Image (tube, rainbow, N blue to C red):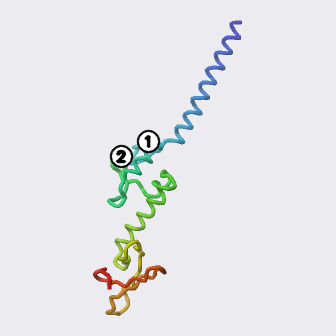
Amino acid sequence: GDENEKEKEKEKVEEGEEEREREGQASRRHAVVLKCRERAEHRFCRQCFRRYIDNHNFLSGDLHCPTCWTLIDIALLVTLASPKQTDRILSLALNRALHSMTDVRFCPAPDCGNALWVDTSRESNCLKMTCDKSDCNTDFCFKCRERW
């Protein structure tokens, strides 16, 4: 009897350890781990981190670790974000990059915003641009960006 009870106790302990290991693996899968600076790791619940992403205005800049304020690389960020958040992050990053380019202009027509590249190397005094979006075709000035 005593030997049998010890064996049952050992099995319960082993089962408990296996369960805790499974829970640990699951929690690691659901955790966000940011490796910020030398040897610094900051852990967050994936749901809380996605809420943090939702509350961030990417137009004002990149996302930083909420613990140490280290910049989070966009490639890592899109692996941590939900698909909807990833679309938003990449769209805003592209938009920000386009706005910083001197040879890109956005159509000023309401509800258009189409980006147009301009060959600034060509010798031309013509400043008139025409939106090439099929349902728009708005004319505007390259320099002042106002409607023509």
Which residue sits at x=41%, y=74%?
112
Percent position (x, y) of residue 11? 66, 20
Q: Is residue 136 left or right of residue 127?
A: right
| Marks 1 and 2 in Cβ contact (< 8 Å) | yes
Which residue sits at x=41%, y=51%?
54
Q: Amino acid at mark 1?
A: Phe
What residue would you read off at disc 2? 66
Q: Amino acid at mark 2?
A: Pro
Say which of 146 and 50 sits in front.
146
Looking at the image, the residue that sits furthest to the left is 144
Which residue sits at x=57%, y=29%?
20
Percent position (x, y) of residue 21? 58, 32
Say which of 99 and 34 sits in front.
99
Percent position (x, y) of residue 104? 38, 78
Counting residues from the start of the chain, the first of labels 1 and 2 encountered is: 1
Looking at the image, the residue that sits furthest to the top is 1
On residue 44, the disc is 1
